[in-house]
Amino acid sequence: MSSSATTEVTGQEHVWSVSEHLDDILGSVRPLEPIELQLLDAQGCVLVEDVTVPVSLPPFDNSSMDGYAVRVADIAGASEEFPAVLTVIGDVAAGQGEQPTVGAGEAARIMTGAPLPPGAEAVVPVEWTDGGLGEGPVSGMRAHSAAPDGAFGEVRVHRPAEARAHVRARGSDVQAGDRALAAGTVLGAPQIGLLAAIGRGTVKVRPRPRVVVMSTGSELIQPGEELAKGQIYDSNSFSLTAAAREAGAIAYRVGAVADDAETLRSTIEDQLIRADLIVTTGGVSVGAYDVVKEALSSVGDEDEAGSGIEFRKLAMQPGKPQGFGSIGPDHTPLLALPGNPVSSYVSFEIFVRPAVRALMGLPDVHRPTARAVLSADKALTSPKGKRQFLRGQYDAEAGSVRPVGGAGSHLVAALAHANALIVVPEDTASVEPGADVEVVLLG
Amino acid sequence: MSSSATTEVTGQEHVWSVSEHLDDILGSVRPLEPIELQLLDAQGCVLVEDVTVPVSLPPFDNSSMDGYAVRVADIAGASEEFPAVLTVIGDVAAGQGEQPTVGAGEAARIMTGAPLPPGAEAVVPVEWTDGGLGEGPVSGMRAHSAAPDGAFGEVRVHRPAEARAHVRARGSDVQAGDRALAAGTVLGAPQIGLLAAIGRGTVKVRPRPRVVVMSTGSELIQPGEELAKGQIYDSNSFSLTAAAREAGAIAYRVGAVADDAETLRSTIEDQLIRADLIVTTGGVSVGAYDVVKEALSSVGDEDEAGSGIEFRKLAMQPGKPQGFGSIGPDHTPLLALPGNPVSSYVSFEIFVRPAVRALMGLPDVHRPTARAVLSADKALTSPKGKRQFLRGQYDAEAGSVRPVGGAGSHLVAALAHANALIVVPEDTASVEPGADVEVVLLG
C-alpha cells in the first residue's frame, strides 16, 4: 500500500486515479514461484529458464523422402530410357535399429525420416524409379505387409542425384547447445512441440494462479432457484469466474456469501488454502451493511508490512469503490470489487486481469487497446475528473466504435452485447460523434 | 468424400488443392448435437437457443446509492444551511424481505440495490446528508454492527431531489419477454453473467468436441526418455493436443503408436468411444511402412455412404499427403496428417482447427488473416502449382512479416519462433522483398 486513505465517515478522503490504483496493485503483486510441470500442463504458462538443446535435431542424417538410398556414382547419367539398375539390399524404415551398408551397385529402400544407411550418399524419391516393378515410374511403394519382396530384387533409377540430395542433415534444425527457447517465452502449441522434440518431458514455468471468486450480498440467490421478494440472482461469481479463466487462471467459484462479517471472514479464511488471489464483489461502498469492508479490516495481520486491505474511492465510473490489499499468513492478494455486475466486470478487466497476468509472469498484462472513431447519435457525456468506461461495439474494419446501452452501471444486458470498453479520460466531459476515442478490446 | 482419388502405386492421381480438401472437410463435418450444460461448463460454447428474459431486471425499483429513501416534498428547497430534518424509521438493506413504509416527514436509510420502500419517491445519497450525526455532510454510513442506532433518530438532508432520483426502475435493464441472447452467441464472461442475472442455471449449447490425438511411428519415443539409435522424440502428439485445446476442444493425447497396422487399428477402435474427432500424424505418404494408410482402409464401414478414409496428395507445401474420412459406427471424422512436425502443425492449423470449430458450431472457423509487406533479404521461392505456407514473424504495428527459418518442413525450431504463416499462392513462384503477402495469424 502506498498511501493511507482514510475510511472515516467524515472528512475529505483521497480519491485515487485509475492509474494510481493499478500501479499500487501491479507494484504489490509478485509473480508466482516457478514449478516443474509436465509439458501439456504448462500450456499457456511462462517459461522461467532458458532451455538449451541437449541433442542436435534431427539427431542423425535422415531421408526426407520415401525412396532409395544410393551411391551417387551409380546413378550418374541415369534416365528413364537408360536407367541405372541397382540391387535392392533391404529396407530402412524409421525406428529400425540396424541398417544395411550400401555398396557399389546397391540401393536400400528407405522411408521418410529413416537414418541414411552407411555407404549411401543420397536418396532418390520412389517416383524417380520403377519401384522394383520393372515397369514405368511409380507414384509410391507397395505396403511392406502386402508385398514383402519389395525390399529386395532390382530397382531402376530414372534420374541422377547429387550427394546429400533428399537428406536432412543431422543438426540442420537445431544444434546441441543452441538455445531452444528463452526464459519469458509463453508456451503455445509450437513451443510445446519444440520442447517435446528436444526431449523435454517437463519444464519449469510459473503456474496458473488459483483465483477464488466470491460475491457477497444477502439479496443474492443462485440462478435456477425461485426469486423471493427483494432478491436478485447472483451473477458476479459466474461472470468473474469465467473472466478469471479467460485471463489464464484456475478459477474457483465460491458463490454468494450473505452480508454477515463473521460468515464472510470464515469463508475467506477457509478459501485461503487454495487461493493465489481472492476476488470479492459487493460490500465495499459507504453503506451500513458493506460487509466486505467491515470484515476485512480485521483479517489482515497488522504486524506485517503490506498486509491488510485498504478501501478507496476511485476517480472512475463505473467502479468507484474498490478494496485492495493482502490477507492471511501468505499475504494473499485480495481485490474487493463493487457489487454492481457491470462495475464488477469493468473493475475485473481493468484491475484483476492485469493482476492475474502479473502472477503468471506474462510480459503484457493489459488488454490490447485501439483508437476508434466514435459512431453515436449524440455526444457522450462523462463526469469531469473521472475516467469513464462505456460499453461499446467496436468494428475493426471500419475503425469505429458505437456505444451499447447507457452509462448506467446496472446495464448487464448491454455489457453482454459489447466487445470493447470506450475510455473517456478524466479531463474530458463530453465526446462528440466522430471524435477519436481509445477503446479497450475485450476478448 | 467428393472424389475417388486412387492410391494405386502407378498411374496419375488427382492432386487436390488446399481449398478442395478444406471444402470437403467442412462439407462433411456437422456441428455436434446440443446439450444442456451448467453455466460455467458452457464457457466458450455456442448457444443454440434464443434465450428470453423470464423476469425483468432489476426485478424491483431499487436504490442506486447508499442514502435515504424520502418523499420529494419533504426535501424541497433543502440546503446545508436550511436542511430538511426527517425522522429515520429504519434500514432497508439489500435482501431484506420486509420494508418499512415511508410517511410524510420520514426517511428510511437505504443501501445500494435495496428495494425502494413503499411511500418513498427518491433516494438522497448519504453524502447529501449529515448521516444522522448532527454535524456536517458525511462521506459514508457507519457500519450497522458498530452503530445500530444509525437506523433511527433524525437525519438532516442538505439538498432537494426530484422524484425517481437515484432509483433504478424495475425492468430498466431488461424486460421480461425480451430476447437476452440470440442463438449462435458465443458465451464469454459477460454473456454468462447475463444468463446468471436472468436466473438461468443451465443453458443449451453445442459442447466442446473431444479430440483424440495420436502420432504414429516406430522411431518415436516419449520426451524425457533416453534416445536409442535411429529414434527421435514424439512431438506431434504434444503440439497437436495443445493446438486442439487452443482451438476449443477437449483433447486427449494418446501418444505414439508403432508402425503396425493391427496395433493402430485396435488403438483407434478403442479410442472411438471418447472421440468426436480423431487426428493421427504420420504414415500417410508413399512409403512401404505408411501404416495409417494401410490400417485405415479396413476400419471404414464400406456399406455406409461417406464412411472410410481417403488418402490424397495436396498441392500444398508443407502438408502434401493427407487423409480424411470417417470411421466406426458413428462415422467419427478422422484427419490423418503427415508425420513431419511442421507439416502436421501447419496441416492442423489449415484443416483440423476449422473442423474443430465447425463441430462447435462457431460462426467463424478460420484463423484471422492480414496483409503484410514481406520483409526479407531475398525473394521467397515457392514451387509453382502449390500453395506454400512459410513460417513468419508478423509485426502488426509495422504491417510487415519476416520469414523465420527456411522452407524445410522439418524446421520445428523456426516454427516455435513464428507467430504467423506466410501464404504463397499456387500461381506464384517467387515473392520479392517489399511485396504484399497474405499472412495467417497464429494465436
Image: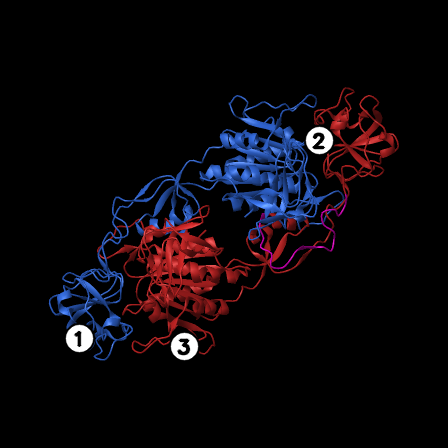
Chain colours: A red, B blue
Query: Could you tell me how far apart the alpha carbons at marks 3 and 2 are, in whole angstroms?
Result: 74 Å
Rendered image: mark on residue B287? 2
User: Do marks 1 and 3 both belong to one polypeptide chain?
Assistant: no
Subunit bearing disc 3? A
The residue drawn where x is 35% and y is 51% is A376
Amino acid under label 3? Ser
Instruction: Residue B86: name its quadrant.
Output: bottom left
Subunit bearing disc 2? B
Subunit bearing disc 1? B
Question: Percent from the top left, x then y, of residue B151?
Answer: 20, 71
Amino acid under label 1? Pro
Q: Which of marks 1 and 2 is in front?
A: 1
Q: Is mark 1 on a helix, strand or loop?
A: loop
Query: Could you tell me how far apart the alpha carbons at marks 1 and 2 are, in whole angstroms?
Result: 94 Å
Rendered image: mark on residue A14? none
Q: Name the residue under label 1.
A: B83
The residue drawn where x is 25% and y is 65% is B111
Q: Is mark 2 on a helix, strand or loop?
A: loop
Q: Residues within 10 Å of mark 1 (few under 14, many from 20)?
A: many
Q: Mark 3 points at which residue?
A: A4
Q: Can residue B71 be seen in this view?
A: no
Q: Nearer the viewer, mark 3 or mark 2?
A: 3
